[in-house]
Amino acid sequence: MATFFSKRNLQFLLHEVFEAEKLAQYPYFSAHDRETFNMALDSATYIAENLMHPHLKAVDKDQPELKDGRVKAHPAIKPYLKAMGESGLIGAGFSFEQGGQQLPELISSSVGFILMAANNGMMYTGLTSGAAHLITSFGTAALQEQYVPNLLSGVWQGTMALTEPQAGSSLSDVTTSATPVDAEAGVYKIRGQKVFISAGDHDATDNIIHLMLARIDGAPKGTKGISLFVVPKYRPTESGKFVDNDVTSTGIYHKMGQHGVPAMHLTMGERDDCTGYLVGQPHHGLSYMFQMMNEARIGVGMTAAAIATAAYHAALQYAKERPQSRRLNEKNLLDAPQTPIINHPDVRRMLLFQKAVTEGSLSILLETARLFDLSSVAEGDDKETYTLLMEILTPVAKTFPSEMGVQSVSQSMQTFGGYGYTEDFPVEQLYRDIRITPIYEGTTGIQAQDLLGRKMTMKGGKAAKLLFAEIGKTIAEAGTHDDLKPYAEQMAAELKQIQEVMAVLMPHAMAGDIERYLADATLFLELFGTVCVAWQWLKQATVAKQALLTHNPEGDELAFYEGKLHTMKFYFHYEVPKTLGLARRLKDPEVLTIVTP
Amino acid sequence: MATFFSKRNLQFLLHEVFEAEKLAQYPYFSAHDRETFNMALDSATYIAENLMHPHLKAVDKDQPELKDGRVKAHPAIKPYLKAMGESGLIGAGFSFEQGGQQLPELISSSVGFILMAANNGMMYTGLTSGAAHLITSFGTAALQEQYVPNLLSGVWQGTMALTEPQAGSSLSDVTTSATPVDAEAGVYKIRGQKVFISAGDHDATDNIIHLMLARIDGAPKGTKGISLFVVPKYRPTESGKFVDNDVTSTGIYHKMGQHGVPAMHLTMGERDDCTGYLVGQPHHGLSYMFQMMNEARIGVGMTAAAIATAAYHAALQYAKERPQSRRLNEKNLLDAPQTPIINHPDVRRMLLFQKAVTEGSLSILLETARLFDLSSVAEGDDKETYTLLMEILTPVAKTFPSEMGVQSVSQSMQTFGGYGYTEDFPVEQLYRDIRITPIYEGTTGIQAQDLLGRKMTMKGGKAAKLLFAEIGKTIAEAGTHDDLKPYAEQMAAELKQIQEVMAVLMPHAMAGDIERYLADATLFLELFGTVCVAWQWLKQATVAKQALLTHNPEGDELAFYEGKLHTMKFYFHYEVPKTLGLARRLKDPEVLTIVTP
């Protein structure tokens, strides 16, 4: 029934490529099996199809407005939150003890994928999960008891309140202040402003719980003086009643897309009556936030992959149905009927690009989510290995789906021609929606600095070495099939090319010239991401090849596996060559973007 | 005063690079000189600054709606049309005899650039000029007398009515019918539907004159049976009165951008009372349209270049003013103030990309416009040379600014970070607006087939040979300066690479396998366009170098010329390497996008 994603592809990735069930061998996930995983996905699909997708256009059209200090959410939001709470999906990734389902990130991020493919303008619950997760990870038992149940049931909304007018990418410049009232009990008075707070105010829940960064009076400058607070819209009193906590909605941003989610400008302490509750230790706020960042970034990548997937499926359907012109080699047969545009090579190229990008994105995201799970349940050396692999892949898993997703949706629109530019089809909305993803949770430039500046060099380059070894396993396996061998060899050549680039760049880092080392970091991330997704395609193709050899599939199943092999080839013949130009530039000694003081 | 384009850059291109005044050596343009050229540009700038730019947001917000069969244009449109008519700018490119200013396309397209940079949502008069031009080129004296004066004065609106629901890219499938009423007098009854007719109905003019493609009853199938008609909204009667001509606005498209321009669905002959007046000979309509196509395509390219230019200037200003974070080599100086983001290499790279794309786009467009002028005023062999050069560059001049402009505006938005995604700044609107340009007047795929399928092969490849010879002159001139020599050599290598690609592709064309020959035509256009704009940058850099050597400029002028050299280098070091991957793919024998029957 769902037209906005391919269930078959998700099942292929989860069970055939990433063997999700193997996670159940670890005690923490031992209550689960393929059936419980699929139950969660089925719940998500039900909600996506019935409570989200039908409202895709509506939440875009009737965007929330700030009136008399309050924000009215679209009427579709409340039933959605209720269903998400009741189905247990907001708490999918939380432990049984915390009231969750103790599902791996591999599955809970797949849930997010399904929901966001249906309607990314209803992006509310991921924020709530993130906020609740900060409290369960670092908050006191009292804070957990007070806030987590209502968050996981969808009765309350959670937010992440980081950005300030003067502190966007530069979080170390946060100035929202926290003045001790009862420091022992972790009670502070909060004053300041936050901007771009998604779901930062609305009436679909009884309370809004902000997980907010602020600076305790007298704290050290910079990143080491920032603390984390729970700042509710309505705060509990000793009597159990809730009173207004002096968090004022000062403004609402009108965005190009994701209209359904209000982005708020909040002012705390206008009446000097805003209370914040310290989470964890003073001055550790930014490090707590960053411990949540991997999941948050996988979440943004998933949103991007989901939006691009919905657009691709819309374009694919249109291309199969829309007749226009004749095949080029039969151009003069005027009596011939027009052919569906999917038969034109240029259109087919655009569709294969979209398929390669969207299914490649989902693959690298699930790979990273699986490593995230392994990093939390494995022990000893394995734990370190999985953690390093997850760390190095996270900037790719956030950025490739976002940046290439923007291009993919653009090609979806182009497939529709003029119709794609109108509101008659969903792609124009998806084109607007996806454009925020290269900005959310650390822009592409920030991700690039994270990859090249931290992840490539940490522990003496161990993460990169481990990743290359993993890719080496895929190369070896693919190399056993004659028709995959050329691609395995190409894959090895791409790794070598990255090493050559690193050999040129590293001396700048060694010499302490970080600005020069990172000047083209964004291009390095593009190169690295293109190669990582090539790895995912080689992996998928190897699994598909094996299935073709062993199961002898027919009909749709045969077409599915052959489609995987074909798309892998497309990616290697059309996308991988882009690394040539990137590597050329990255090895080029000419400096053109650094200002001399 | 104008913040949406650089007057200095336009003057540089027109007078220093393209030596506009030399056109006045031809008798047709002999009434003109630098002063009259600049007068037209000043008029345009005045209108752009006073009657267009102030309404940028308003025409986006209050988009026209279809109510009771009529469309109300934004109140800003009428005064704009009046000023454009009175200033003579609608007729800028028409002969004195036709009531125009007899200005070269080089200047009239620059006028369009200024207007569209100010507010592309007021794109009305280019359509009127196009319609009037069809009448002056192919219509009878009576038709000219009846329609042209009111079009050029802005009292009437002109449109181009080509597309039908089943005939978008495939114009040969037009089915709107024309039944002879008085064939001798060129009077026909029109029945059918047209879609996506820009400015196809509104109340800011007294009449709307559609230049419409239709098929005379019994006409041959395909492209050779299509005729061109004038179909007014109100038709003149013998008494001189005007009566309703049965052209009904059946629908209005809601588009992602260019909200100010209504895109109409029109139905002709619902009451069997729609009259059309034949323009030129029966069955020649499509060829007439295509003779106008070069100008129309330059017009779309100009619109794209203008939108991207406005976004670049907004991003540049923001980057100079917005402080965020510290330089990477001084990251730990917590006491240091934040630095303007233009000082971060990644932001500077994004800005240089925008400058390279927008000023490179304007340059290739003016080059093409100048060739257009020379092709109409030159004689003998020269005429053929200029015509062939203009023909081969037109698909590039339409596509590079559109496709790369979309990417450029995306980088403008990224420069703003989250703010760029909001309505607080103009870039989100420009991001939506520019996305139509790769679709208008022949999609990128159609342009690519035009380039590789027609222009590269016509007259035994003569156009390409002439173009390479032109580029060779620039290479030779650049090569005389030591610091430009490496770029001149790179330029020569790029031409050689294109020849290698052609050597691989041509055998498919020779064998009659057009589908295979054109399968990756879009990538060929991307390669070819990248190289043509490299040529423009080398040309600009050579002129700038000469100016630095001879004029010894200081201050802003010194910075301007040095900026040109720097941006040329940026283009060669960052953009030109992309041709490596494109050439690799284009030479690759693997076929992945052709369906076997």
Image (spheres, coloured by chain):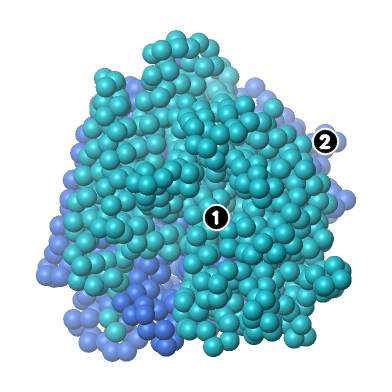
Chain colours: A cyan, B blue
- The crowd level at tag 1 (other Cα within 10 Å; few <14, some 14-19, many 20+) is many
- Residue B240 visible (yes or no): no
Task: Name the residue rendered at 42%, 15% in the picture.
Answer: A548
- Looking at the picture, how far across and down is residue B7, in whole percent? 44, 77
Can you identify the residue that label 1 sits on? A296
- Looking at the picture, how far across and down is residue A169, in whole percent? 49, 70
- Residue A145 visible (yes or no): yes
Can you identify the residue that label 2 sits on? B270
Q: Is residue A555 left or right of residue B351?
A: right
- Looking at the picture, how far across and down is residue A191, in whole percent? 67, 82
Look at the numbered discs 2 and 1 and tell me whether their residues touch, using CB distance below 8 Å: no
B123 in relation to A422, above or below = below
Q: Which of A128 and A301 is in front in this view?
A: A128
Q: Nearer the viewer, residue A568 or B237?
A: A568
| Residue type at numbered disc 2 | Glu
Q: Is residue A40 left or right of residue B405?
A: right
Q: Nearer the viewer, residue B26 or A520?
A: A520
A530 in relation to B16, above or below = above
- Looking at the picture, how far across and down is residue A303, in whole percent? 58, 48
Task: Name the residue rendered at 42%, 63% in the picture.
Answer: A445
Identify the image quadrant of the C terminus of chain B.
Answer: top left
- The crowd level at tag 2 (other Cα within 10 Å; few <14, some 14-19, many 20+) is some
| Residue type at numbered disc 1 | Ala
Callout 2: SS:
loop
B335 in relation to B481, above or below = below
